[in-house]
């Protein structure tokens, strides 16, 4: 399959290098040099997005927040920031992964391939499940409570999908993070804790039923 990749960075030389590399890998490459241009090119429906964090006018995290409700494709942040909170903020804004500059093209290629394969597995699912008043459509990647579809970020949905497909089984926070994101990083537990809190809050707006149970000292599980 000829995947379409959107690359957003204000470093023109980096964009040129990435375009040349990934076009040789048979990707269809779209580029944008700032956040405003990225917002325009989202309509081209990329399969994956590489998004620089530090850009003038609109930074990468703000671009991610604006587009995340409109698209479900993976977003990988490109960043020179190394602080734990910066990485957490990127993931909570709707990103799926991040890679620190300067980076290896082979590592970036491997990350992109892993995310695209994961998306392909999601697309071929054609199943849905009912849990009390909740319906999870695994094919469309949507969660409905009563008559309302929840507005979930991609990582929030991925956590619901993973836990709900293993009801009653306890997973620690690191395992959940590794499963939904595909790699290990410092601060994983804090990200999962915040995402679960957000999921619970969104569900609680429509039902008193609690679906994700905290098992103290161990992690979380989906109630049977």
Image (cartoon, rainbow, N blue to C red):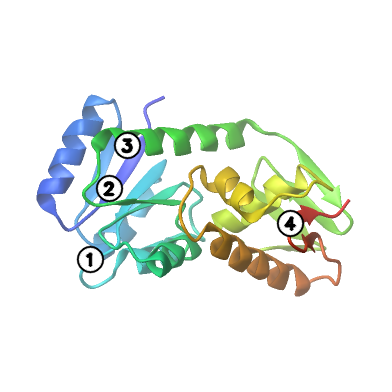
Give the foreground label among 3 and 1.
Answer: 3
Residue 203 at what x, y percent from top left? Answer: 74, 68
**Kind of element beneath mark 4:** loop
Q: What residue is disc 1 on?
A: 55
Q: Earlier in the sequence, mark 2 or mark 1?
A: 2
**Kind of element beneath mark 3:** helix
Residue 52 visible within the image? yes
Q: What residue is disc 2 on?
A: 7
Give the foreground label among 2 and 3.
Answer: 3
Cα distance in 3D space between marks 2 and 3: 16 Å
Give the foreground label among 3 and 4.
Answer: 4
Residue 60 at what x, y percent from top left? Answer: 32, 63
Q: Which residue is situated farthest in the left direction here?
A: 13
Residue 71 at what x, y percent from top left? Answer: 48, 53
**Kind of element beneath mark 1:** loop
Cα distance in 3D space between marks 2 and 4: 39 Å
| Residue 107 circle label | 3
Q: What residue is disc 4 on?
A: 218
Mark 3 Cα within 10 Å, few/some/many (few <14, many 20+)?
Answer: few
Q: Earlier in the sequence, mark 3 or mark 4?
A: 3
Give the foreground label among 2 and 4.
Answer: 4
Residue 46 visible within the image? no
Cα distance in 3D space between marks 3 and 1: 23 Å
Q: Earlier in the sequence, mark 2 or mark 3?
A: 2
Instruction: Depth check: give the residue in front, 173 or 58.
Output: 173
Q: Earlier in the sequence, mark 2 or mark 4?
A: 2
């Amino acid at each position: 399959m000829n995947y379409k990749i959107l690359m957003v960075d204000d470093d023109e030389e980096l964009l040129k290098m990435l375009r040349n590399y990934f076009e040789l890998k048979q990707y269809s490459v779209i580029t944008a040099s700032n956040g405003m241009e990225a917002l325009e090119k989202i309509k081209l429906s990329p399969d994956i997005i590489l998004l620089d964090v530090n850009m003038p006018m609109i930074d990468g995290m703000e671009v991610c927040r604006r587009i995340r409700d409109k698209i479900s494709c993976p977003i990988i942040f490109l960043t020179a920031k190394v602080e734990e909170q910066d990485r957490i903020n990127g993931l909570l804004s709707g990103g799926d992964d991040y890679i620190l500059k300067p980076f290896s093209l082979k590592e970036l290629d491997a990350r992109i391939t892993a995310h695209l394969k994961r998306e392909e597995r999601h697309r071929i699912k054609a199943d849905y499940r009912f849990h009390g008043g909740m319906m999870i459509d695994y094919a469309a990647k949507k969660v409905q409570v009563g008559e309302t579809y929840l507005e979930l970020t991609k990582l929030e949905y991925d956590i619901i999908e993973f836990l709900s497909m293993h009801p009653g089984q306890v997973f620690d926070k690191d395992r959940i993070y590794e499963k939904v994101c595909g790699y290990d990083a410092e601060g994983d537990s804090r990200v999962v804790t915040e995402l679960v809190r957000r999921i619970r809050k969104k569900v609680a707006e429509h039902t008193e039923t609690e679906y994700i149970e905290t098992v103290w000292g161990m992690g979380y599980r989906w109630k049977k």
